[in-house]
Image: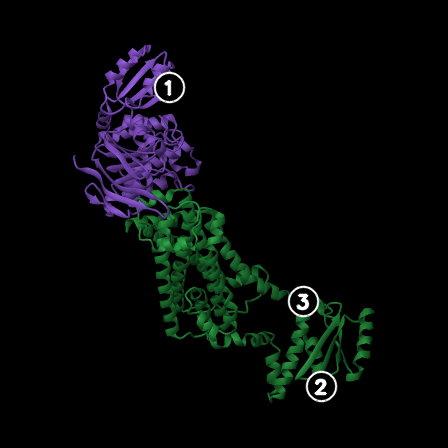
Amino acid sequence: MGGLAVDIRGISKRYDQHVAVRELSLEVPTGTVYGLLGPNGAGKTSTIRMILNVILPDTGQITILGRPNTDEAILDRVGYLPEERGLYKKMKVRDVLRFLAELKGIGAKEANRRIDEWLERLALKTAEKDWGNAKVDELSRGMQQKAQFIGTLLHDPDVVILDEPFSGLDPINAQALKDTVVELKRRGKTVIFSTHLMDNAERLCDSVCIIARGEKVLDGTVAGVKAEHAGRFVAVACDNANEPAVQAIMRDRTLVRNVDDQNTFFELEMVPGTDPQLLLTRLVEARAAIRRFELVQPSLHRIFLEKVGATGVEPGMSGHG
Amino acid sequence: MAKLWAVIRREYVERVRSKWFLIGTFLGPVFMLVITVMPIWLASRTKATAGLTNIQVLDATQSPIGARVVSKLAAIPLEGGGGAAPVLKTVPVDGLVTAEAAATKAVMDKEVKGYLVLSGVAPAEVKVRYAGRNASTVNDMQVLRDAVRTSVLAMRLEGAGLDPAKISELTSVRVAMDEEVLDDRGRAGGGSGKGSIIVGYLVSFLLYMMIMLYGQNILRGVMEEKTTRVAEVVVASVRPDILLAGKVIGAGAVGITQQLIWIFSGVLIFSQRVPIMKAFGLGELPISMPTIGAGFLFVTLLFYIFGFLFYASLFAAVGAMVSNQEDAQQAAMPVTIILVLSVIFMQPLLLAPNGNMARIMTLVPSASPVLMPLRMSMVDVPAWEIALSLALVAAACAVSIYISARIYRVGLLMYGKKPNMAELIRWIRYAG
């Protein structure tokens, strides 16, 4: 393995009124699960469309597996699941899937074999009913999502790009998706997915990139990103947190940069360069009834909020889990 | 290429499989049968009704015209054996009013069905009027009109020095009357004039229908791909211009398939017309099988292909521009209007196929695919005009595909508001 599955160098994309992506550079190593994180409107979908050469960047270059993405042959090795899903409603499932496979250069015969395999695997073809022969609009929403997912993977792509794959999935399909992502990684494939759900990203991704307002905020391995922010986050449980003395310490901006106040539980971010021990000492001096004081690894969610800031997140878009 | 082929095949197979195609293809020949049989059937109904000849003919022209009309009418075979022969009354010009009053009374007393008034100067300026109980019966009036017209014509020909025997031979045939109407249209055509005009008219109308129906079908298809977001998956695998080309070619091929089925069944029906007519209890068709040259067919096919590409790509661009049905209708309006314009020019072209209007309109790329086959079926269009017309439509086709591909590429992923003209121009200019 080794090498880069996707290498983005300084791409920008400007629409009439606004800049969707600004000077973005990313490196996605081959064989990893890569999360593209950001609030809605951050430029995730634009970035993904540019990777797929569906829209052209105003500046910058993108290579996939070492080849420029304007090379059509290289795009045949990419599988794509768009955020807004859709299939030809009046067509038979099997015919749609064969069509999608043919667009990736798979012959009809080989496509048919794989379609059967996948339909059985995702329980769309059972002893009683073969949904492959049904029209797309006869399928339930969940089944349509499965069919679309088959369409993404039918040509056994080396790079799989999923735009908000978890949105609209029921828990069972969401689990099936996670399983498939893990399996793809085991088989050496590269998976890139965008999400605003940090829990999924934290569990699934090897590396992440957080973008907001079209710009990269941070990127790196999940472990690396968390380590970089470790030692600065403190979880405190305190019974008399409403005491003015305790409150004063929590609000001391020379010590505490940011506090997530949950009444008797606090997640604090220390001002860089300050020692959490100092915080503990001061809390004890203020006679705080401490039940718990722990240096914690921040969640991606926490880091995301810290980095993007409240202004970068549209209301309701910071979805946790 | 394999991808283009996949797009073409999907488009073709899905359309041919649809109910819409089946119904349209089946109804086509039925329609054709109806328009072939209907005129004959109607013509066969045009027998004079019983008692038609039971009329008075008031001749105030002081000429033999009245006698001629009467003998004409008396010779007409009538349903149910006929009634009394028409009564000729020669009246002086100033006695017409009294004669008419008497005739009116005769009609009221049910002695006669009606009366025919001939006045003016025969044969130059005969004035004809009919009053009677059957004045609103279209067929009866047709028979009377024909009798008068033939008589007047015979008198004029005699005046021009033609042999009376020859004239009666010529004018006794009713179809001979039709020939006068057809003169302007058919004379220059050569071959089986009337038949080839019908074919030319059918071909032109079919081309128009095909372009309109399939063009709007493509519009809907593109819009559906866009609104169901299938387009996004597809354009991640295949370039938008390939997708556009595949859709247009696929739908165009469906149109050709349908036309071939129609032409084939039309020829089949026509070759079996005698037994079919018999089955309907009708006589022989007055038109013979037109001979269609291979050259005409080839040129027509070229016009169909270019015309279809021209309009279909524009319709596809419109489909990519909009996100809902109402916007689609509005945005398709300019395209539909220029297409409909070509049909509006069919009428002037029929009247003067070599007139300036016809010559210009068969060079205008938006109209020539519909009008040129029609004009070619009527007159010998100079080869250079056909070549120029084809070259112009091919060039227009290239421009329309180029512009449409650009609109298509941008529009396919733009949702929401329909673009205005300025935005559209930006889309076309836009490289990405």
Q: Tell me how the rendering is colored.
A: by chain
> Where residue A247 sits in the image (x, y, percent)?
35, 17
Q: Is residue B19 above or below residue B128?
A: above
The residues tagged by marks 1 and 3 sit, at their Cα atoms, a distance apart of 94 Å
- Please, what secondary structure does the residue beneath circle 1 have? loop
Q: Nearer the viewer, mark 1 or mark 2?
A: 1
Q: Nearer the viewer, mark 1 or mark 3?
A: 1
Q: Is residue A99 visible?
A: no
Check whether the beta carbons of the residues at disc 1 and disc 2 lie within 8 A of each other: no
User: Taking B114 as reference, is B184 left or right?
Assistant: left
**Badge 3 and badge 2 both on one subunit:** yes
User: Taking A53 as reference, is B47 left or right?
Assistant: right
Q: Is residue B408 above or below residue A207?
A: below
Q: Which residue is mark 1?
A: A262
Q: Chain of mark 1?
A: A
Label 2 crowd bin: few (<14), some (14–19), many (20+), radius 10 Å: some
Give me the residue at 43% from left, 75% from top. B380
Q: Is residue B193 visible?
A: yes
> Where residue A284 sits in the image (x, y, percent)?
29, 11
Q: Which residue is mark 2?
A: B63
Q: Chain of mark 3?
A: B
The residues tagged by marks 1 and 2 sit, at their Cα atoms, a distance apart of 119 Å
Q: Is B100 in front, or is A41? A: A41
Give me the residue at 61% from left, 64% from top. B42
- Please, what secondary structure does the residue beneath circle 3 have? helix
Three-letter amino acid code of the residue under disc 3:
Val
Q: Which residue is mark 3?
A: B138
Image quarter for residue A214? top left
- Please, what secondary structure does the residue beneath circle 2 have? loop
Tell me, by letter, which chain the rendering colours purple.
A
Three-letter amino acid code of the residue under disc 2:
Ser
Q: Chain of mark 2?
A: B
